[in-house]
Image (cartoon, rainbow, N blue to C red):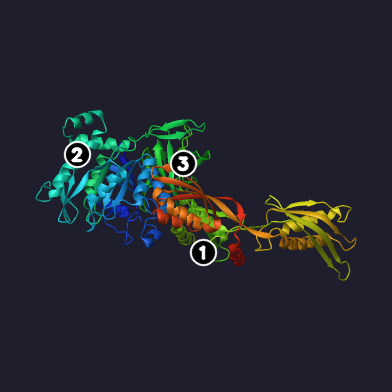
Amino acid sequence: MNYYDVSKIRNIALAGHNGSGKTSLAEAVLYKAGASDRLGKTVDGNTICDYDPEEIKRKISISTSLAAFEYNGMKINLLDTPGLFDFAADMIEGIRAADNVMITVSAKSGVKVGTRKAYDEAVSQGKSKMFVITKIDDKDANFFNVLTELKTVFGPTVCPVVVPVIHDHKIVSYVNLIEMKAYKYNEKGIAVETEMPNAEISEKFEYRIEGLIAAISEAVAETSDELMEKFFEGEPFTQKELIDGIHNGMNRGIITPVVCTSAVDMAGIDMLLKEVELLLPNPCEVFPAEAYTPAKNVVEIKCDKQEPLTAFVFKTIADPFVGKMSMIRVMSGKLNANSEIINSANGTAEKIGKLFTLCGKKQTEVSYAEAGDIVVASKISAKTGDTLSEVSRIVDLPPMNFPRPCYSMAVKAKNQGDEAKISSGMQRLIEEEPTLSYTQDENTKEQILSGLGEQHLDIAASKLKAKFGVDITLTIPKIAYRETIRKKVRVEGKHKKQSGGHGQYGHVWIEFEPCLSDELVFEEKVFGGAVPKNYFPAVQKGLEECSKKGVLAGCPVVGLKAILVDGSYHPVDSSEMAFKTAASIAYKEGLRQADPVMLEPIGELKVTAPDENTGDIMGELNKRRGRVLGMEPVTHGTTLIQAEVPVLEMHDFAMYLRQITRGMGSFTFDFLRYEQLPANLLTDVIMAVKDDN
């Protein structure tokens, strides 16, 4: 692959709702550009971007893939991101590395939640945006309805550039509103210029084309005072003024052009590539990135190959054969193969070996990458989100903001002895998936895998088996219940056993009472030497060992204070073991008499959801024994609900929230405290805990 000046590079992320045609569009673009000799299909599992075995098997994108190709004197780095909400991290990574975001919208189904999420993420990261209406060839497609919906949802910045001419429910031709030319496509997907539509072809289109031209002119007029003045004087814009106006408007976020394509018959793909060249900003035209020096001063990172090197690791791929592969966006300077640079995250030297550019899984080795380009390094220690710098200017680029894991399952090995393999394999997967976490629950001692949804964890388990040869099962995690007492009691514990030789004798009187402590509180108030001091530690140790299991369900006991008040001993038969046993006898009897109760963990829930769903969510929280503490508006049309909910009721809440809000809702849930379990649930919980144990 040739090396290109930054002005000839375009970095584009494909984002949008699942099933809106991102991968098919990428396949058509690569085929049209000559980067591929065949037009693959998602259903056939032979596309360039969906090459992972899991993607082929499930026929969905689950990871961001890079497809770099050359076209008309340019290098285009195309990042195909997943549309499933479980893999939101990959969309965030892809958009972070790009300068432009092409948001695909199906002409059949229109604006979906994934459309809004992709748009919002592009806005939050300050990226240029373009809508690509796909599947225009579908018999149920309705371009103009979708265009109206885009304008309604995203406002007047939406600006049509390529539109279809429809007659008798069939596409007759496509009009490029910048060129003011119409094109037909033959069976090979090649454009042939044709006459502009008139009333004979479509009565409605004659009206619409005037309105569309007015819309594009009004949008371009907003980009400068000179163009605004010309617009008010009623002068039409030249083709160059339209191109420059849209180009500048995209870069400033005030124009979002709309084009239409069909990946099946290749219609509109050539015009899309033309708009990529003319309208999309190149890396040096976008606003400079900001970074932080070690002294926390803010510096601008100019996209210039003469500047010191600054590069950002935006994605990691865990490959069991090649090893770790790191996708890197070069922000400034020049990244050379076989060089040594600094990892700003930890200040250590990072040895760069070979560098590659990717087109799907096809690797092409390169000797360097300059500012504005995207490249892949293998077997480096840097993690996703790390900044790579030269010694002369060490800076840190801001991290990416990923959603927190919200759905958890317990992990068990199907085969004994695979636990170590699971741990090492999971660490590799977590490097690849920042929204996965793998931890041990300190209370239940279970290994917990957490992610963004059921499918997320299912695919992680499949990857673990395919890549690292470890088979696991996922089960609902145990809940860390506790037991405590509610009243004060005084009990006796006596252990007396006589056999040949020395006997065993230990005798204690202990008072048990509630207190505010997670650990056993032990005191002694023995008078007159009824129990010698050298046996006090044995009594305490016996009680501490017993407090690990309560008398109801065998859960750890909290809020317990034990006071040794009396007892007796035998000068020959007493021993530490005898007093430990006596203490355990007193413990079991005392807790039975002290009105024992079960405690369940309560968490603090914060749910962000659309206003229209708040009533349903609050009703659901009431069903789940939650207490709603308050509501407050977050942004226009979004509300934050704060509540306290038992952990027992929260396992499938992530699935419920996604369903009720169609993916627009999110939440965090953090442990808060323990509260007494309602009496009507006691029997079921005790049985469940005993079954787990």
User: Could you tell me residue 396's position as x and y percent?
Assistant: 47, 37
Q: Categorize mark 2 by other alpha carbons within 10 Å: few (<14), some (14-19), many (20+).
A: some
Q: Nearer the viewer, residue 229 or 595?
A: 595
The residue shown at (28%, 48%) is 149
Q: Nearer the viewer, residue 503 or 644?
A: 644
User: Could you tell me residue 72's position as x and y percent?
Assistant: 24, 43
User: Could you tell me residue 595's position as x and y percent?
Assistant: 69, 60
The mark nearer the N terminus, 3 or 2, is 2
Distance between the Cα atoms at labels 3 and 2?
A: 41 Å
What amino acid type is highlighted by mark number 2? Ala
Is 511 on the left or on the right of 346, as rendered? right
The residue shown at (82%, 65%) is 495
Q: Which residue is mark 2?
A: 214
Mark 3: secondary structure: loop
Q: Nearer the viewer, residue 455 or 389?
A: 455
Q: Nearer the viewer, mark 2 or mark 1?
A: 2
Q: Which mark is residue 473?
A: 1
What amino acid type is highlighted by mark number 1? Thr
The outermost residue toward the bottom is 500
Q: Categorize mark 1 by other alpha carbons within 10 Å: few (<14), some (14-19), many (20+).
A: few
What amino acid type is highlighted by mark number 3? Pro
Q: Which mark is residue 399?
A: 3
Mark 2: secondary structure: helix
Residue 73 is at least partly visible in this image: no
- Do labels 3 and 2 touch, CB within 8 Å? no
